[in-house]
Image (cartoon, rainbow, N blue to C red):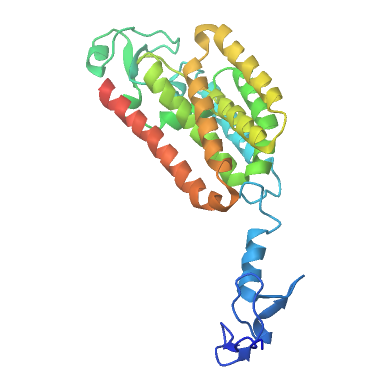
Amino acid sequence: MTQPPPVQGCYRHPDRPTLARCQRCRRPVCPECMVPAPVGVQCVDCVRDGVRATRADEGPFGGRRSADPRLTSLILIGVNVAVFLAVLLTGGGYARLATALSITPLGQCLVDDASGSYYPGVLDPATCASQPGAYWAAGVAYGAFWQVLTSAFTHAEILHIGANMLALFFLGPPLEQVLGRTRFLAVYLISALAGSAAVMWLAPPDSSALGASGAIFGMLGALLVITRKAGGNYQLVLVWLGINVVLTVVGGAGISWQGHLGGLLGGLAAAAILVLPAREDRRRWQWPGLAALTGLLLAVIVVRVIMLR
């Protein structure tokens, strides 16, 4: 003869005997703690966890959906334009403000006439002080650490900022729509930092670079990873990326290929951390992974600073 199932107390109210069990966790539930489900009942905790996991405002890769996915890009554009106007009003791309915000691995001995002329091979403040009409513009290795980020918001030519901001306007909103605001901003800033790290290691110590191009290349890299993961037409992204690589190569000495390369690699790495883990593991790995990547980039920059000094 089949024995009836044992009567147990509700998992939240042990003094209330019940035969009902949650269809998900199999814990005994009393009428007060059960919620009708398509099949059987569920406990209130499982229902709450399910709602949290499938909430309507969560994007495909864990980020909260933005009410206006254009907002972050428009703010970034506004910051870039504000810095550009400040640079123009203080003397242009070779004046002291632009020099202080651009990234230089070591530093430059500049002629103090806002012409951009400098003393090549003079790589320390003491020697620069002995040169007529010169001043030392400190780089990252001499304490201007802010340059690793401010350089990505600094432009000196209208064509340069126009092209970068146009790319940001078209690439930024789709990425924010997929990743959410904070994750998109993290990809953007990490790409900018990675571009600066590449400049620190691959560019001449007394060279200077500025512009959001590293972050733009990072967005292209992120878009490539996301499109490939989602099964979209990533070949089209490769075409656009290839066009930009060609423009970088044929653009001559005026284009920082180092910043472009570093930004692209940074965007690829950041996007991979966000979208490649399995759905159930993303919350566990996304932010620690981005923090580790940021720490690695900062460590790479610090090592280069030590070597240059």
Q: Nearer the viewer, residue 262 or 95?
A: 262
Q: Quadrant of the C terminus?
A: top left
Spot occupied by residue 239 in the image (x, y as percentages of width and height): 68, 19
Query: Which residue is found at the position 68% from the left and 80% from the top?
Result: 34
In the displayed structure, 202 sits above or below 23; it is: above
- Say whether residue 91 is visible: yes
User: Does the image show residue 210?
Assistant: no
Residue 45: where, in percent of width, then height?
61, 73
**Count of marks placed on residues:** 0
Report which quarter residue 271 is drawn in.
Answer: top right
Q: Is residue 50 left or right of residue 268?
A: right
Question: Residue shown at 64%/36% (left/top)?
Answer: 229
Foreground pick, 127 / 210 = 210
Q: Nearer the viewer, residue 183 or 209?
A: 183
In the rendering, at what x and y percent does residue 128 appear?
A: 27, 13
The picture quadrant where one finds residue 30 is bottom right
Task: Find residue 83 and report its horizontal and vertical position in percent.
Answer: 54, 29
Q: Residue furthest front?
A: 1
Q: Nearer the viewer, residue 88 or 240?
A: 240
